Amino acid sequence: MPLYHPVQIGKLSLSGNLFLAPVAGYSDRAFRSICAECGADFAYTEMVSSEALTRNNEKTENLMSRAPNEKAYAVQIFGGVPETMANAARIVLERTSAECIDINGGCPVPKIIKSNAGSALTRDPDHLYKIVSAVVEAVEGRVPVTVKFRLGWDAEHITWKECAESALKAGAAAITMHGRTRAQGYEGKSDWNALAQLVKFVHEKTDSKIPVFGSGDAFTPEDAKRMLEQTGVDAVMFARGAMGNPFLFTKTREFLTKGTITEIPVEQRIQTGFRELALLVEDMGELAACRDARKRFCAYSKGLEGGAALRKEIVAAESVEDYKKIFGSYLG
């Protein structure tokens, strides 16, 4: 099979295997729209709180909305109470057109762990089973349910195998693993050997019917190719590597299919940032969008000549006009 290929998640057919991960503060509708434009085959929303969803929190509703150009997307939910997660899944189906629901078993943030969610679930694979079961039952086969987790809690508690067994037994249609423990956060290296073992384990157990996706340390097209070759994952999920760099999808697809990489001109990078800003303004109003876009333009400016001086100006931008002036003088 070629490295770039279609993927089947339950009854959902995707044309390719380059995905955008659920990244808090980034994977909103505006950025997902830009990634779709740049060739992402599938994207996940930022994680959505099951508690907030069942309380009808308006901000939470906005996190789930689909970008008009997304062919398919998944809503990722998190929580520690099976019944609440089941209710949240029903709400997702009622209020969105999402093709998939993903369960967060990987977030290492203490606030999330305190609610027995995110990577707390790697400490208790039995509880993970209850949560996945409840969500699978709630959606009644209307969309596939997938699970994303980490290697384990820490180096002494590597539980990916137990978590995979729980997810499969509960009816998960796909599994994603980030090859770091909760204790590592984003430090150290992602363990691609464990990822390869997970692929072998899941494919053997399910006769290759359940796909496995890889996350962690995929920053370049070359990384994606190595991950696919070394681990056998069915798809690569880009997270931090795509921040300010949605072109990673374009370049990776080109690299996997043709073996070449076409560099993106500086002007095009900046124009793409402005398109993302315009979408943010539509979604949240100018001031909030311009403040939120500071981190995004800082990411777009990485690797640019004079980038450090540029970023000093970006972090003070308050309006679209400010950004136009900053980049107008930069481009001369």
Image: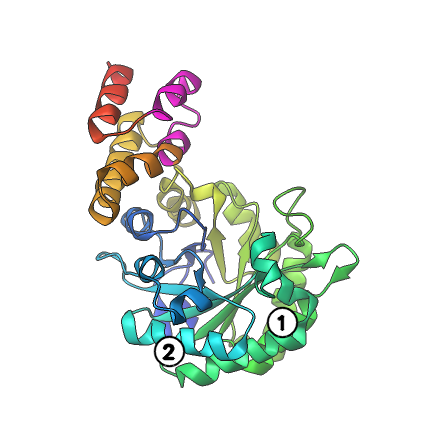
- The residue at 48%/54% (across/down) is 237
Label 2 secondary element: helix
- The answer to whether residue 188 is left or right of residue 38 is right
Q: Which residue is mark 1?
A: 164
Whether residue 152 is situated above or below residue 299 in the rendered picture: below
Left or right: 154 in relation to 105: right
Neighbor class of circle 1 (other Cα within 10 Å; few <14, some 14-19, many 20+) is many
> Which color scheme is applied?
rainbow
Bounds of the magenta segment = 296-316
Amino acid type, label 1? Ala
Q: Is residue 125 magenta?
A: no
Q: Earlier in the sequence, mark 2 or mark 1?
A: 2
List x then y, in percent, for residue 238: 47, 49
The majority secondary structure of the magenta stretch comes to: helix
Residue labelled with disc 2 = 90
Task: State whether residue 149 is above or below residue 250.
Answer: below
The residue at 45%/68% (across/down) is 51
Task: State which quadrant residue 245 falls in.
Answer: top left
Residue at position x 50%, y 41% from top? Answer: 219
Q: CA distance from mark 2 to mark 1?
A: 24 Å
